[in-house]
Structures are given as C-alpha cells and as structure tokens.
Image (spheres, rainbow, N blue to C red):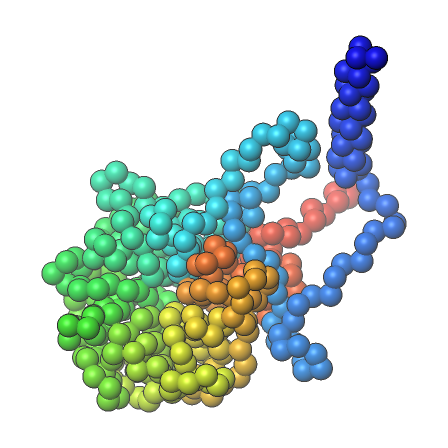
Amino acid sequence: MNSIIPGTMMAGVRALAAALLAAGLAACGPTTPERAEKPAPLVFPSPPDEPRFVYERTLRSSIDVDPLSKESELRLMLTGEATTAEGLVKPYAVAVHQGKVYVSDTVDRFVKVFDFPNRKYYKIGDDDREPLAKPLGIDVDSAGNLYVADATRKYVMVYDASGKFARKIGGPKSFERLSSVTVDPEGNRLYVVDIGGVTSDQHQVQVFDAKSGNHLFNIGKRGGELGEFNLPRDLAVGKEGRLYVVDGGNFRVQVFDHDGKPIKAFGKVGKQPGQFSRPKEIATDPQGNVYVADAAFGNFQIFDPEGELLMFIGDRSEREAPAKYLLPAGIAVDEDGRVYFVDQWFRRVDVFRPAAIKENEGYLGRAIYPPEPKAEKK
C-alpha cells in the first residue's frame, strides 16, 4: 500500500502542472466569444450627472510600464520564482511630461520614472557624486528637464531629459525647510517654496532664473494677510502666468500675478466642499482650472481659475480601492488633462482621464495603445 501512495501523488502533481500549462497556453491563444463583459467604468461625477473624468489605471511598480509577457507569467506560476518588479515605497509628488510619469519616493530616495513612450522604468538620483537624500516636490519643463526639491540637502537638483544630473540651485544658505519646486512652462523661472517652521519667519516663495540659478526675488512673508503665508506647501503656474500657492497653515490658496503681486485668495478651514483641512499639493490644467490635494479629506478638489468649486474626486478610506485614499499628497495634470494623484499610504498613483478624450488619445494613451500598423498595399 505504501508503494502506491508516492506514485499517486506524483501523478496528481503532473496532472496539476499539465492543467496549469494548458490554462496558460489557452490564455496565450485566441479568445473565445464567451468573454466576460468589461465592467462599467468608474466615472466622476457619478450618474445621472454628466461624467467629466474616468478612473483609468493605477501605477504601483515597474510592471505597470513594462508588463510581464504571458509566457513569463506562466513560468513564474509554475516555478514559484519571484518577480523582479520594483514598487513605490513612499511616493510623495508626481510630474508628467509627454507620457513620462515621474514620482518622487522619499524612502527609496529616488525619482522613479514610468516611461510609457519607451516602455521602460528607471530611477533618477543615484549619481554617486550628487545623490538625492529626500526628494519631495518635483516638476518638469517643456524641454523635459526635471527639477527636484531635496529637503535634506536643501538644493533644487536639476536633471536633463535623459535623467543625467546637470546642476543644483540654492543650498542650505538659501532655504530653511525646502518643500516644493515649480518651473514655468517655458523653463525660465523657478519657484521654490520654503515652508518655514514654528520658530521661523521664512515662510515664502523664492524665485530663481531656471537656467542660470540666479536668485531674482521673494514672494511673501509669515502672516495671515493677503500676500503673507503660514506654512506654504506648493505652487502651480496657471493661465496668463498666474501663480497659485497652497497656504497650508492659513487653509487657503493664494493667487499672485507673474511678478508676485497678490491678487486674491480662496478657501478657508472647514469640512465642506470648497474648504480645506490639510491641503498639500496643487496643479493646474490646460484650461487654467486648479486642482488641490487634501490629505485629511482624502480627495482632490477642482476649482475654476477664479476659485469657484467645480467638483471633487475621492474619499477618505482605510480600505484600498480606486478613488479611495488614506494619505494623499502629490497631484499633477498632463498636457491632455489627465490627472495623476499620489497616495503615500497605499503606495500608488491613480490616473484619471477626462471623459472627453478616449483611452488611446493623448500622450499617455498613444504610448499605451499605439495605432495598428497599416497593411502594405500589394
């Protein structure tokens, strides 16, 4: 009896492996007409209102830009080998340029790049001479140059479009508590937010020449009046060069002209839509609308250029799901209006597509869904 058991077990293992192999090969082959229906898209606002945004995808690791082939997935399933995917550890900010998605990771101390047009994933900031220590805010200019606010080193680190270190701006003598960096679309002016602190009066935005690194002027000082800041967090450039600054400790967004003259402010502390509880990063879209991430609300709110609330997306939740957030931080809007939203706790970046464009349109859409090659005429 004992001599029969090992053979039976071996036969079972072989049968299981054969079944898995057959299933994997079937998955690689043509699909059958009996295909499960695609679930309805998650849209915002929800019906019956007309949708303005569609949840599109989530970025977590290198596999999201360089996916495993079906053959590789089958091999891993059969052998039990571990994948070599590299994930986000504690993402903070996000920036996007023509289908390239840059995410700062404060624990791994890199900027991680999801390069969809070239189907590759790589890291920026591991240069032995000028390594990143704590990358926070990031931004990209129209030429693809990357600017990184390093909170520990107190420099803005600049990299060219290939990810090679180019130069650094500022330093410990310039900044007290570096928070974020924003470059204007032309790559001429650099706006660097110094959050200050409880014992500091250096709550301000410093403006530099982005090419030379020369300091030009400062915007604001500590206080609660228009044009003053209490723990500023981030800045975005809108239409006509307007500057939108998250004034975190005053629970508002302040609006300045191109030269730093205060225009107005909107928002106040509260729990209702249009108010703020813990505002963090900010972005603008091609139409000039303003997007503000709020870590306490677990959402981002969308305002028109004058500060009127249009809508919000997301809810605070301890259970992970699309548009559910526990510790959101960074936000960016690309050239086509796609929104990229970072959650530090769930270690991910959610992408929302404007409902007016198709999934294969725009820089990201064309990179992920390239057009089919035209058949040659005989």
Name which residue lies at 50% across and 72% down.
299
Name which residue lies at 61% across and 65% down.
55
**Which one is nearer the viewer's eye here, 36 or 52?**
36
| Residue 103: x %, y % from top left | 42, 55
The residue positioned farthest toward the right in the image shown: 33
Name which residue lies at 11% across and 61% down.
173
Q: Describe residue 285's horizontal placement relative to residue 185 as left or right.
A: right
Up the image or down, 161 lies above or below 2; here it is below
The residue positioned farthest toward the front in the image shown: 1
Q: Describe residue 46's horizontal placement relative to residue 328 as left or right.
A: right
Q: Is residue 117 visible?
A: no
Up the image or down, 263 lies above or below 233; here it is below
Up the image or down, 230 lies above or below 107; here it is below
| Residue 239: x %, y % from top left | 41, 78
| Residue 123: x %, y % from top left | 40, 44
**Which one is nearer the viewer's eye here, 184 or 278?**
278
Q: Is residue 227 visible?
A: yes
